[in-house]
Image (tube, coloured by chain):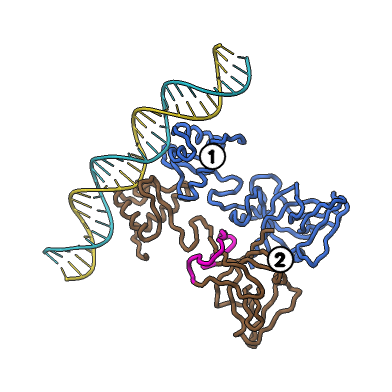
Chain colours: A brown, B blue, C cyan, D yellow
Amino acid sequence: MAKLSDRQRSILTFIETFIGENGYPPTIREIGEACSISSTSVVNYNLNKLEREGYLSRDNKVSRGIKLAEENGDTPDGIVRVPVMGRIVASEPAPVPSSDFGYFGSDEIIELTRDVVGTGSNLFALQVQGDSMIDAMIDDGDIIVLQPHHDVRNGDLVAVWLTDKEETTLKRFFQEKDGRIRLQPANPHMQPIYIEDAQTVEVQGRVIAVVRQP
Amino acid sequence: MAKLSDRQRSILTFIETFIGENGYPPTIREIGEACSISSTSVVNYNLNKLEREGYLSRDNKVSRGIKLAEENGDTPDGIVRVPVMGRIVASEPAPVPSSDFGYFGSDEIIELTRDVVGTGSNLFALQVQGDSMIDAMIDDGDIIVLQPHHDVRNGDLVAVWLTDKEETTLKRFFQEKDGRIRLQPANPHMQPIYIEDAQTVEVQGRVIAVVRQP
DNA sequence: TTTGACTTAGAACGTCTGTTCCTGCTATAA
DNA sequence: TTATAGCAGGAACAGACGTTCTAAGTCAAA
């Protein structure tokens, strides 16, 4: 599903812009005119091809029956569907999606915009249970959006599972020069935690956003 | 632009759900069938009426040429554009939009989904500056979405301007039986504030959502 | 070269769809 | 009562639209 002819690509982009401008999909003849294709059958042929490749779906016998496919939960209008994988509790590791695609095992799905989650992909969300993360200024019931991220950069706010303490916590991550890991609470009045053995820190994901609905 | 017949309302909601399901608008006959209208001219008549009232726009002679109007920043696909009116600081009253419509004076616009902001209308957003609202578990840089709301119910999380203390704060609002107003911090370890003179409390809005991007 | 798969063109068919015209009903005001 | 406006139903027309059929061009493999 990789190779697309120039013609097919121009058809696809035209449909996108057309829907954006008009609010409804174009007809076969409108596509043909825009992409300088004289025959409706050629447009039809390429549309069928695009459908077979999964770029769009068509409703037979229906005028303007074209719907653009939504790739990886990203709808064409900038909405991102993020699966809520469950609850995050201090006393347990966070439930992380097992595979990269599919919403299996997710309780529900929350829709967010790119304005909130940025350009991340493979996102998942967790609802915080209990007020054990109050020191990270995260309340009971808050929803945190995570990106599975194994190469964490210094300063990232991450959800980590501390194997020896058997505790999940949200802290800013810093790799110190002396090999230790410093976990800095968001609340500036609280003291950081220093971890001697980096093996005891399992990063579950980087926090992309926190959403609270009082 | 207020009065809508039952028929017109059912047409409108059908168009909404149809677009949501199919990705393209319905035809006149599909509307008629769904709303049990036998004649296409009646549908056409009501569509023209709805267009005249501003609820939708039509493209003449175009099949499925219906586009739902976007009211108060609410796009047809469930995205809500919320103007960010500025920053909210503890030492100043929150900047509230002067009129009910238009984004005049807004620094920028943030797009959110209905999943986040619910069904509210006339929403506006403010970015929190400083960590003075740390007791409400709201951090520097957080964005709070507010609904201008003058009839506040007990338990609502509201942004209030205390005229005598000259301070903006976020608290849960309770009207006590003895006439006093109790402002309860979100942090359960903190003590509530009791206001004797209700006149000194100006409710700027009800907090719909809080969004944090670390 | 021949073969076959893929792509493009053109035309015709039948249905879908927006529009229009005519008719009738109901409610309000004169 | 009549007049007017708003609303609803039915039928028919013309054009739009998806589909299908035939034919031909392109290109790589045999």
Residue tagged by mark 1? Answer: B10
Determine which quarter of the picture holds residue A186. Answer: bottom right
Label 1 residue SS: helix
Label 1 environment density (alpha carbons within 10 Å; few <14, some 14–19, many ≥20): some
- What secondary structure characterizes most of the magenta part? loop
Q: Position of residue A148 (x, y in %)?
A: 55, 72
Q: Position of residue B212 (x, y in %)?
A: 65, 64
Residue at x 34%, y 49% (from the top left corner):
A32
Residue at x 48%, y 68% (from the top left corner):
A101
Magenta residues, start to end? A99-123
Q: Position of residue B17 (x, y in %)?
A: 51, 47
Please give the chain letter of the residue carrying mark 1.
B
Please give the chain letter of the residue carrying mark 2.
B
Answer whether residue B171 is magenta in the image.
no
Q: Earlier in the sequence, mark 2 or mark 1?
A: 1
How far is the residue under mark 2 from the one under mark 1? 44 Å
In the rendered view, would you say B28 is above or below B214? above
Do badges 2 and 1 share one subunit? yes
Amino acid at pointer 1? Ser
In the rendered view, would you say A74 is above or below B102? below
Label 2 residue SS: loop
Answer whether residue A110 is magenta in the image.
yes
Label 2 environment density (alpha carbons within 10 Å; few <14, some 14–19, many ≥20): many
Residue nearest the viewer, comparing B172 with A64: B172
Q: Work out which quarter of the rendered image holds the C terminus of chain A and state it.
A: bottom right
Residue B49 lies left or right of residue D19; in this view the side is right
Residue A163 lies left or right of residue A34; in this view the side is right
Residue tagged by mark 2? Answer: B139
Q: Position of residue D1 (x, y in %)?
A: 56, 11
Amino acid at pointer 2? Asp
Residue at x 65%, y 67% (from the top left corner):
A128
